[in-house]
Image: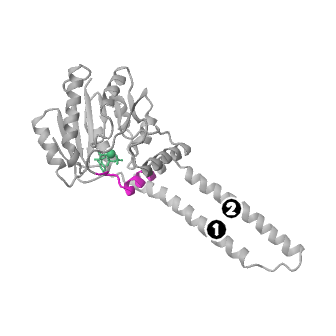
Amino acid sequence: MNLAIVVPCFNEQEVLGTTIDHLRELLNQLIAEGLVDPESTITFIDDGSKDKTWSMIETVARCDSSMHGIKLSRNRGHQNALIAGLMTVRGDAIISVDADLQDDLSAIRDMVLKYREGAEIVYGIRVDRRTDARFKRMSAEGYYRVLRLLGVDIVFNHADYRLMGYHAIEALKQYGEANVFLRGIIPQLGFKTENVYYRRAERFAGESKYPLKKMLALAWDGLTSFSSLPLRWITLLGFTVSMFSFAIGSWALIARIFFDGSVPGWASTVIPMYFLGGIQLLSLGIIGEYIAKIYTETKRRPRYIIEKMI
Ligand code: UDP
Ligand code: MG
């Protein structure tokens, strides 16, 4: 089997040297054991880095024929960089892994073994999140739960560390959405899937390239690209509030007609006004979010632009 490893990198000069060494060693070992083809490759996707990342990639690619690089014309985010790699690189199977070596590389071997046993997609799953900061752990686990509740088919504690076979990649190529959330799309592909488990380490150098803002953006994309339940909630909310208003309205009318001395109150006028105003704004906002999604999808803009390949 011809294995291709794809590594998205964004400003990773502190870790890249070590990552390259580790990956090369691992690949050579797999080749020596006859598990993968000697023509197997490692491709680094430079996601518009501003530091020395690309020149480092270029240097290794020149002197090692199994190492390649793809340079995107600008920073497009982890998901798009990953897609660029999956769509461009050829191989019987592609494994995607982060550049910071947080994901235990020995799981690659297990993935290859599972592939050889017939799995088309193999998910790398974190056994625990002890090494993550408390906030990140809680927010991430909470997020997976929310997505599950919303009916998004997502693999718990699996990030983008996985093996995909040729057929799965070909299937993925048919998904042309601009708002990509691979973790949501890939379970929809079907195929025979397997899991491998690993411990996630701490980033050994450099800092996280996923600040809270990017994390929230990814979370929101994942949610709105895979579930229209929030829209249904608006309908339900609207329905409930209408019933409520109808009940109060009827009561007011009855009181006015049959009982004397009912003073038209200020509170009963103003409170529902604010309440309804608030709900309407919220509903419009959520609907707007989906319209924005339609807007970006209909433009059919490219998800990434490749500047150079080596
Ligand atoms: N990354 C990328 N483009 C970005 C942000 C991140 O290609 O805009 C890459 C980064 O180089 C790393 C991977 O995505 O290989 C995961 O990023 P990071 O380790 O910073 O995320 P965390 O592990 O903190 O969630
Ligand atoms: Mg990381």
| x then y, percent, for residue 88 | 26, 39
| Residue drawn at 20 percent across, 30 percent down | 25
Q: How many marks?
A: 2
Residue drawn where x is 17% and y is 32% of the image: 66
Residue on which the image places disc 1: 276
309 left or right of 101 in image: left
Q: Helix or strand or loop: what does disc 1 sit on?
A: helix
Q: Provide residue 19's location: percent of width, then percent of height.
A: 22, 39
At mark 2, the secondary structure is helix
Label 2 or label 1, whichever comes before in sequence order: 2
In the rendered image, is residue 250 in sight? yes
Q: Which residues are magenta?
A: 207-220
Depicted 290 relative to depicted 280: above or below: above
Amino acid type, residue under disc 1 in the picture: Leu
What is the x, y in percent for residue 233? Answer: 60, 54
Circle 1 packing at 10 Å, graded few (<14), some (14-19), many (20+), is: some
**Dominant SS in magenta:** helix
Where on the picture, by quarter, is residue 282? bottom right
**As displayed, is residue 53 above or below residue 20?**
below
Mark 1 C-beta closer than 8 Å to ligand 1? no
32 to the left or right of 123: left
